[in-house]
Image (cartoon, helix red, strand yellow):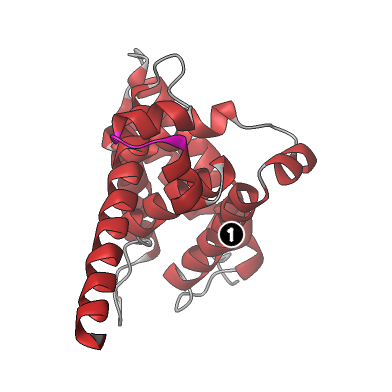
Amino acid sequence: MTTEAGSGARRTNRRGLATREAMLDAALEALASGEPGSVSANRIAKAAGATWGTVKYQFGDVDGLWAAVLRRTAERRGGLPYRENNTAPLAQRVTEIIETLFVGLTSSVDARAIENLRAALPREHAELERLYPKTAAELASWKETWAQACAKAFADLDVDPARVREVAAFIPGAMRGLASESQLGSYQDEELARRGLANAIVAYLEPPLSD
């Protein structure tokens, strides 16, 4: 009896995990489409062959669903390119970060899903935290995770930590701007723009020459 009960529980758990994964996949696909009504838990549930009751069971509410979607994208995105005992110079490290982010923002389904979800959420932090506390907490955690990743990427170099934090603060917005220009079909030279941004960051981070 105990063995049979345990096997049944495992099967139920596997089905539950499969349902959860299917709903997260459906959510990312719907959000990335950017279609009217794509930011809808009911639509996502239907796309996954589930119901609103399933959403509530798996995620608690729509806030839990959005937080889980964001967490999934963060897990798949991973951290910055980082190598132990990295001997690459500052310029190369900055370029790697810029290029990695640009590729992710312009070719990733997850990136489109994140942008469309964020566009549908309240802009004011107080309202976002009141209506979607779990989602707000997940987004807020990204700020610290990103700052730590940038600090780690340059930790062994002679650069000002305060300036690294400043650079970490503006890179996401700057890269979204460059990605948006690319997706809109800008006449600007995309490679030139990225190289210019990287050079500006390097110039800002490089320690001043001693007399």
Q: Position of residue 168 (x, y in %)?
A: 55, 54
- In what element is the residue under mark 1? helix
- In the image: residue 126, left or right of residue 188: right
- Where residue 58 appears, as percent x and y from the top left, is 44, 52
- The location of residue 26, given as percent across then percent down, is 31, 36
Q: Residue at x 24, y 71 (%)?
A: 8
Residue range (magenta): 48-52
Q: Name the amino acid, label 1.
A: Ser
Foreground residue, 126 or 8? Answer: 8
Q: Quadrant of residue 11?
A: bottom left
Furthest-bottom residue in this view: 2
Residue that appears at 46% across and 36% down: 52
Q: Report x, y in % for residue 180.
A: 42, 24
Q: Could you say which is closer to the camera, residue 152 or residue 202?
A: 152
Q: Who is closer to the viewer here, 142 or 208?
A: 142
Question: Which secondary structure dominates the residues rendered in magenta?
Answer: loop
Q: Is residue 115 above or below residue 135?
A: above
Residue at 40% x, 63% y is 90
Q: Is residue 193 visible?
A: no
Tell me the residue that label 1 is attached to.
141
* Viewer-closest of 172 and 96: 172
Q: Quadrant of the C terminus?
A: bottom right
